[in-house]
């Protein structure tokens, strides 16, 4: 992107091809980005001004990663993908009746355990509510008639 000085009228403004800043036509470097504006036009930079043929060839070849030891593969979690073996016929079929019966028994036992825990929870909640109701209904303790009040203690004994 190196330009030669063109025959522009005096006072004309050019733009830097790298950063698009306005520059005077006689400058050899851009004051904004420091890019060289006048120089060899044959300079090619692989990857910047031209495609790198070696990079294209490497991408077309496709590289395989180097083989790693099994220990490093185990630590990093990179396992070689095994060749898939087709499943044998009947391997994905329903389980035999005795296995299905055991599965159903376990499912019923789990449901019974859930329901009994729920029933215990409901009983505990109702008991707590009943206690709260009894506490709010019972009257506050009052002074007994035989006990002298604080006002009588200060005034002295009652007149006879």
Image: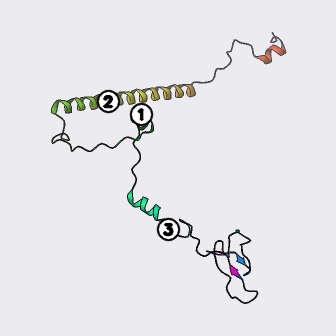
* Of marks 2 and 3, the one in the foreground: 3
What percent of the width, then of the height, locates residue 148? 74, 13
Which residue is disc 2 drawn over? 110
Does the stretch in magenta take in 13? no
Which residue is disc 3 drawn over? 51
Say what secondary structure mark 1 lies in: helix
10 Å crowding of disc 3: few (<14), some (14-19), many (20+): few
The majority secondary structure of the magenta stretch comes to: loop
* Of marks 3 and 1, the one in the foreground: 3
Q: CA distance from mark 3 to mark 1?
A: 40 Å
Q: Which span of residues is magenta-colored? A: 14-18
What percent of the width, then of the height, locates residue 10? 75, 88
Which of marks 1 and 2 precedes in the sequence? 1
Q: Residue at x 72, y 75 (%)?
A: 28
- Disc 3, disc 1: CB below 8 Å? no
Q: Residue at x 58, y 74 (%)?
A: 42
Which residue is disc 1 drawn over? 71
Q: Nearer the viewer, residue 78 or 25?
A: 25
Q: CA distance from mark 2 to mark 3?
A: 67 Å
10 Å crowding of disc 2: few (<14), some (14-19), many (20+): few
């Amino acid at each position: 992107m190196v330009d030669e000085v063109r025959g522009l009228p005096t006072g004309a403004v050019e733009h830097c091809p790298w950063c698009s800043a306005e520059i005077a036509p006689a400058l050899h470097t851009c004051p904004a980005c420091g890019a060289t504006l006048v120089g060899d036009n044959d300079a090619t930079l692989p990857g910047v001004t031209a495609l790198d043929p070696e990079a294209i060839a490497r991408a077309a070849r496709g590289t395989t990663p180097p083989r790693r030891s099994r220990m490093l593969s185990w630590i990093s979690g990179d396992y070689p993908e095994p060749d898939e073996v087709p499943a044998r016929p009947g391997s994905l079929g329903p389980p035999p009746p005795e296995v299905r019966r055991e599965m159903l028994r376990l499912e019923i036992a789990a449901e019974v355990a859930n329901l009994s825990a729920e029933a215990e929870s409901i009983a505990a909640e109702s008991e707590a509510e009943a206690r709260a109701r009894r506490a709010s209904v019972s009257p506050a303790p009052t002074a007994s008639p035989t006990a002298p009040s604080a006002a009588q203690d200060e005034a002295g004994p009652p007149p006879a």
